[in-house]
Amino acid sequence: MLKIRFWPALVVLIAVVLAIRLGFWQRDRAHQKEALAAQITRHQHSAPISVGSSLLPLKEIEYHRLRARGRFMPEHVVYLDNRPYNDQPGFHVLMPLALEEGGYVLVKRGWIPRNIKDRIAFAPYCTPASIVDIEGIARADAGRAFELGSGGSAARLRIRQNLEIAAYQAETGLPLQPFILWQTNHLNDQLVRVWPSPLTGVARNYGYMVQWWGIAVAIVLSGLYAARRAALSASK
């Protein structure tokens, strides 16, 4: 008969419960991404929403297709560093658009490669001086890169690691929309617009779920085996 020792059994129980909970957390993450995928698919097949002077709440507009008409403001450009594309280092170009109807929206225009020899020398790209029509997807931010401390995010630096809309709005004084427009249409401006999907990793989440639940089973079996060995040793 197995003799269960309290403290070893408690440690095994805690480890099993933790592994099971982590498995459920990974499952919930996968379900959230699947729900987001369905939402994005619906938005992709709907007509684009026009951006004007009225503020569009982020919670109502995120991942929707948008259309904006206005003039770019290159004097307020920001380059987000450490944004590789096809294993090549580069920058994402962010620039506010002064809307024809009034107001402003920050546009993530595209990617440019980094000059390996000179960090502050940018590959050539075009910024139309005339009024342009921009189409894209509303996102809560411009995407984040790993950053130690404040890194390159200090105000008034053209090259930064990350950008917060509220801080940038305070810096420039522009009354921006509370989202960033990730541009998808082409303007022959030498910028690359191939944006990563926010839905990557669903299969990985399910894989981690199975791994954690497998670990829970392994812990239980290991605990039972150790208890049996201990019982056999005590009976000798």
Image: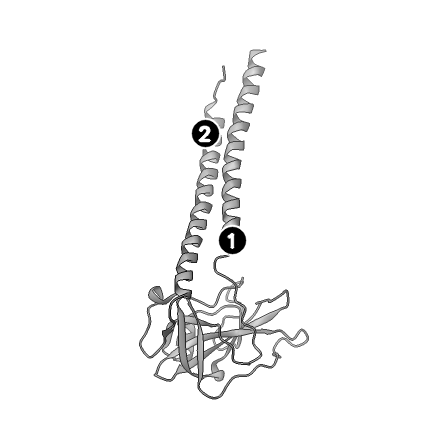
Indicate the quadrant where residue 140 lies: bottom left
Crowd class of label 1 (few under 14; some 14 to 19; many from 20; radius 10 Å)? few
CB-based contact (under 8 Å), mark 2 and mark 1: no
Farthest left residue? 54
User: Does 223 sit above or below residue 58?
Assistant: above
77 to the left or right of 66: right
Furthest residue toward top: 236
223 or 111, nearer to the observer: 111
Mark carried by residue 201: 1
Q: Amino acid at mark 2?
A: Leu
Residue 63 visible to an observer of this rendering: no
Q: Secondary structure at mark 2?
A: helix
Task: Residue 223: give x, y in percent of width and height.
Answer: 52, 27
From the viewer's perspective, tell me whether residue 18 is left or right of residue 58.
right
Q: Quadrant of the C terminus?
A: top right
Q: Amino acid at mark 1?
A: Gly
Report if residue 86 is visible in the image: yes
Is 73 or 190 nearer to us in this picture? 190
Residue carrying label 2: 10
Residue 173 drawn at (x, y percent): 39, 80
Q: Is residue 186 above or below residue 142?
A: below
| Residue at (52, 45) in percent of width and height | 208
Identify the residue shown where x is 34% and y is 78%: 52
User: Is 163 in front, or is 131?
Assistant: 131
Tell me which label, 2 or 1, sits earlier in the chain. Answer: 2
